[in-house]
Image: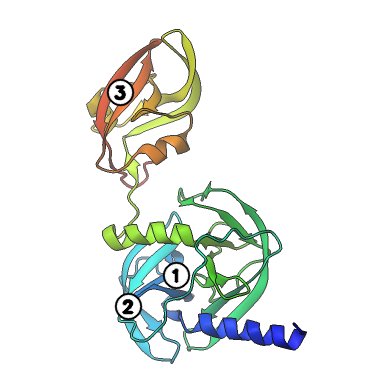
C-alpha cells in the first residue's frame, strides 16, 4: 500500500468515526462525546461538572438538548441521552489489546461543529489499575502525549477506526489516558441505572497486616476505626479485629475488599480476634461521600 492510499484510508476512518462524535456546548471549556449506544453519548465527567443538561452539537451542525443521566468522577465518565436520529453508533474494539507503539487517533468536535482529529501512539500499557479518585479501570492505556483542547471525552481509535476507549487527562498532568471500552460499558450500565457508580461501604478504616488465626499465620486487614451506625458497627466488628475473609474469599488488600462489597449484599465476614476466628454477618451499604470502605 502506498503512502497516498494509506493516507486516504486513514482519512476515511476519521470521517466514519466523526459521524458518531458530538461536541459539548458547556459553560466550561467544552469537550467531545461519542454515540456509544443508540441515544446514549459517553463524554468526560469533568466537562459536565454539576450540569443536569447540555447542548450537543451534532455532525450536521444541529444543536440538541441532552440530559446528563449520570457522572462518575472515579473514571471521569459521563452518560448523556438524547434523540439520536440517524447518527451511527461508533464501532468499538471491546476485546482489543493495544501494544506500546500502536498508532491511534482521537476525533472531537468543537462547539462550532468543526470536527478535529489528533494522531499519536500508545505510550504505555499495563493491567487493571485504580485512578487517584478510586475508579477501577480494566486496562492502563496511556498515550504518548496530552490532549488538545476540546478532546476531553473524545473517542480514541486504532488505525482501522475501531474505538479503543475514551480519552481523558483527568488522571495525569502530562500524558492522557484511554479509558478502555470494557470500563466504559461497565460504568455506563451503572450510570444509566443509578446515576452514579454504586460502591460498597461497611464503615471501617483498615490496613493490610499478617495475623494469627487459630495457630496459623494469615493475611488480612487490621481494622483501625469503625464508623458509628455503619454496617460494620451494627454487625459487631471491633477495632483491632483482622478481617480475613468476606463471603468466603480472602481479603489481603483493600482492593480485594472493595471488589467483594456489592451494595445490598448480605455477606459473612471472618475475622481474627485475639488469635481466634469469629464470623459476623453484615449488609453492604452504598458508600456515602468521603468514605472509602
Q: Which mark is residue 47?
A: 1
Mark 1 or mark 2, which is nearer the start of the sequence?
1
Residue 16 placed where, x, y %? 52, 83
Q: Earlier in the sequence, mark 2 or mark 3?
A: 2
Mark 1, secondary structure of its residue: helix
Q: Position of residue 68 (x, y in %)?
A: 32, 70
The quarter of the picture where the N terminus appears is bottom right
Camera-side residue of 247 and 111: 247
**Total count of labels:** 3
Q: For the C terminus, which image quadrant? A: top left
Asked whether residue 228 is in view, the answer is no
Q: Position of residue 166 (x, y in %)?
A: 51, 66
Per the image, label 2 sits on a secondary structure element best described as strand
Q: Camera-side residue: 186 or 144? A: 186
Indicate the quadrant where residue 67 lies. bottom left
Q: How many residues crowd around disc 3 within 10 Å: few (fewer than 14), some, or many (20 or more)?
A: many
Q: Above or below — where is 284 with respect to 47? A: above
Q: Which is nearer the N-term, disc 3 or disc 1?
A: 1
Tell me the mark number nearer the camera, choosing from 3 and 1. Answer: 3
Q: CA distance from mark 2 to mark 3?
A: 46 Å
| 177 is higher (above) or lower (below) than 264 | below
Circle 3 residue: 237
Callout 2 crowding tier (Cα within 10 Å): few <14, some 14–19, many ≥20: many
* Residue 2, above or below 93: below
* Residue 165 left/right relative to 198: right
Residue at 66% x, 87% y is 8
Direction from residue 55 to residue 149 in the image, left or right: right
Q: Which residue is mark 2?
A: 66
Label 3–label 1 contact, CB within 8 A: no
Amino acid at each position: 500500500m502506498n503512502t497516498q492510499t494509506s493516507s486516504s484510508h486513514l482519512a476515511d476512518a476519521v470521517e466514519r468515526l466523526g459521524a458518531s462524535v458530538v461536541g459539548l456546548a458547556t459553560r466550561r471549556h467544552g469537550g467531545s462525546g461519542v454515540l456509544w449506544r443508540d441515544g446514549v453519548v459517553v463524554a468526560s465527567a469533568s466537562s459536565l461538572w454539576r450540569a443536569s443538561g447540555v447542548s450537543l452539537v451534532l455532525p450536521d451542525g444541529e444543536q440538541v438538548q441532552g440530559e446528563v443521566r449520570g457522572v462518575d468522577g472515579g473514571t471521569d465518565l459521563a452518560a448523556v441521552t438524547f434523540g439520536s436520529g440517524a447518527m451511527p453508533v461508533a464501532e468499538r474494539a471491546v476485546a482489543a489489546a493495544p501494544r506500546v507503539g500502536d498508532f491511534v487517533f482521537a476525533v472531537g468536535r468543537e462547539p462550532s461543529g468543526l470536527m478535529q482529529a489528533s494522531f499519536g501512539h500508545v505510550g504505555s500499557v499495563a493491567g487493571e489499575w485504580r485512578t487517584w479518585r478510586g475508579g477501577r479501570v480494566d486496562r492502563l492505556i496511556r498515550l504518548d502525549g496530552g490532549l488538545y483542547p476540546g478532546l476531553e471525552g473524545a473517542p480514541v481509535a486504532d488505525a482501522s477506526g475501531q474505538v479503543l476507549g475514551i480519552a481523558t487527562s483527568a488522571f495525569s498532568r502530562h500524558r492522557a489516558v484511554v479509558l478502555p471500552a470494557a470500563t466504559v460499558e461497565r460504568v455506563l450500565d451503572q450510570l444509566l441505572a443509578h446515576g452514579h457508580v454504586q460502591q460498597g461501604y461497611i464503615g471501617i478504616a483498615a490496613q493490610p497486616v499478617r495475623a494469627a488465626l487459630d495457630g496459623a499465620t494469615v493475611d488480612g486487614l487490621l481494622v483501625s476505626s469503625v464508623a458509628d451506625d455503619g454496617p460494620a458497627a451494627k454487625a459487631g466488628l471491633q477495632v483491632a479485629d483482622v478481617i480475613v475473609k468476606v463471603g468466603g474469599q480472602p481479603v489481603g488488600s483493600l482492593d480485594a475488599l472493595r471488589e467483594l462489597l456489592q451494595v445490598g449484599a448480605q455477606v459473612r465476614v471472618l475475622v481474627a480476634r485475639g488469635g481466634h476466628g469469629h464470623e459476623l454477618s453484615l449488609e453492604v451499604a452504598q458508600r456515602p461521600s468521603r468514605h472509602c470502605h
